Image (tube, grey):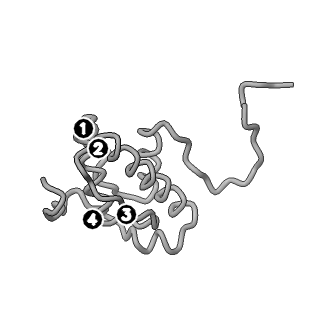
Amino acid sequence: MTWGSRVPAKYLPTFDAGSAAKTDATYKANAIRVQTLLNQRLAALGGGYPKLATDGVVGPETTKAMIVVAQKYDRMNLLPLTKKEDIANWLTFFNVKAISGDSTQTSEFPFYNK
C-alpha cells in the first residue's frame, strides 16, 4: 500500500470516530496523543511520510499511518478500531498511559511513598 492509495475498508474504524472526537473529550485527547506519537514514529522510520493532522479524528490518513507502523512492528492486531476504547491499545503499544475520565489525583511517582 502506498500513501496515495485508498485505505481498505477492513482497517477503517467501525464506529463513528469523527463523532466520538466531537463528543468525548477523553477519546479526543487520547486520539491526539496517538496521532502525535504516530507522527514521531513515521519520522523515525523515514520514507517521507506526510505529517498527520493532530485533530483527534481517526480517519483514512490516521489509519494509513497506523497500518504502516503496525506492519513495521508486526502488530496488525491493533486494527481496526472497533470501539472508541481501542485507541488505548495504541497508547499501550507506544508505552504511554491513556488519559481517563477519572479526575482523582494520583502521584507522579506511584512507586514512591513517603
Q: Are marks 1 and 2 in contact (CB under 8 Å)?
A: yes
- Comes first in the chain, label 3 or label 1: 3
Q: Is residue 109 left or right of residue 58?
A: right
Write down the residue under mark 1.
72
69, 81: nearer the viewer: 69
Residue for badge 3: 58
32 displayed left or right of 81: right
| Pick the front one: 41 or 7 | 41
Secondary-structure class at tag 1: helix
Tell me what residue is drawn at x 38 percent, y 49 percent: 38
Residue nearest the observer in this picture, 80 or 108: 108
Which quadrant holds the C terminus?
Answer: top right
Mark 4 vs mark 1: which is more N-terminal? 4
Label 2: how many Cα within 10 Å (few below 14, some 14–19, many 20+): some
User: Gap between marks 2 and 3, in whole Å?
Assistant: 15 Å
Q: In the rendered image, which quarter is residue 15 located in?
A: bottom left
Residue drawn at (29%, 58%) of the image = 50
Instruction: Check the image and name the residue furthest to the right.
Output: 114
Q: Position of residue 70 (x, y in %)?
A: 28, 42
Q: Amino acid at mark 2?
A: Val
What is the tally of numbered marks visible in this picture? 4
Real-space CA distance between mark 4 and mark 3, rounded to the nearest whole angstrom: 7 Å
- The residue beneath circle 4 is 60
Q: State whether residue 28 is above or below residue 68.
A: below
Q: Secondary structure at mark 3?
A: loop
How far apart are the two marked residues, 4 and 1, measured between alpha carbons? 18 Å
| Distance of label 2 from label 4 (alpha carbons) | 14 Å
Q: Position of residue 16 (x, y in %)?
A: 37, 70
Residue at the spot of label 2: 69
